[in-house]
Amino acid sequence: MSDIYLGLIHHPILDKRGEIITTSVTNLDIHDIARSCRTFGLKKYFIVTPIEKQHQLVSNILDYWNKDFANDYNPDRASALSFIEVENSFEDSLAKIEEETGVKPIVAMTGANFKESDGSIAMLQEEAKREERPIFLIFGTGWGLHPQILERNDFFVDPIRGIAEDGYNHLSVRSAVAIYLSQFI
């Protein structure tokens, strides 16, 4: 299996009117996505936001779980949170992966609103193995990734399709991440 990195992008993101915004980092996304990443053996989980107060929020949460009492109380949580990195931009995250691996990763993205795709997680894995490149799997928040992020994509992963009769398709990013990561097995 290729090395897999995950990025949760909080900027640049679209709001429901299609305007560029920065979304809030949430405690649930920090914990739950880290636990999914740890369970499925990812190399790193990047939380991407340019807002310094959000960097500090993540740092405070990580510091708490690395303290003696919290770490002793729940070492599994501390283990999952240990490989989170907060970056200012998508480009900074990408540069960190290239620095760590010595090669540009395949940038893969997905979204509930994608109309076209390049294929499944299995097809993405085959491409990564054939090219001997890591995977940087990107998820957006808000109403989706801004076009300046989408244009950096190498592989659009098939969106998750539910079976609701009325077409409802609006999973939390935490749920979507867990579903996609389970497909790497």
Image: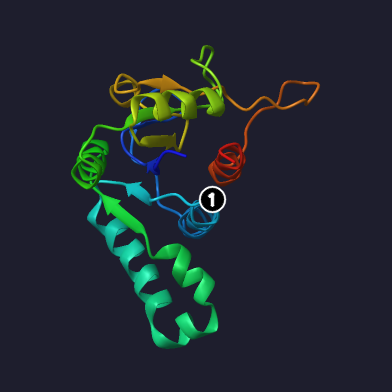
Residue under the image location 46 percent in, 55 percent down: 26
> Is residue 65 depicted above or below 98 in this figure?
below
**Looking at this view, is 185 or 86 the one in front?**
185
Left or right for 49, reference 118 = left
Write the residue at 42% across / 38% down.
2
How many numbered markers are drawn? 1
Of all residues, the one furthest to the bottom in this rendering is 69
Please name the colour scheme applied to the rendered image: rainbow
Residue furthest out toward the top: 116
Q: Which residue is mark 1?
A: 40
Q: Which quadrant holds the C terminus?
A: top right
Dot 1 alpha-carbon crowd within 10 angstroms: few under 14, some 14 to 19, many 20 or more: some
Task: Give left or right: position of 26 versus 97.
Answer: right
| Residue 162 percent coordinates (x, y) | 71, 27
Tell which of 9 and 99 is nearer to you: 99
Pinpoint residue 88: horizontal percent, then vertical percent.
23, 46
Q: Quadrant of residue 168?
A: top right
Q: Position of residue 70 (x, y in %)?
A: 47, 82
Q: Position of residue 48 (x, y in %)?
A: 31, 45
State the SS at label 1: loop
Pick the residue in front: 185 or 37.
185
Q: Is residue 95 left or right of residue 127?
A: left
Which of the two residues, 8 or 154, is positioned nearer the viewer here?
154
Q: Is residue 54 above or below residue 163?
A: below
Farthest right residue in view: 165
Q: Is residue 146 above or below residue 171?
A: above
Q: Amino acid at mark 1?
A: Phe
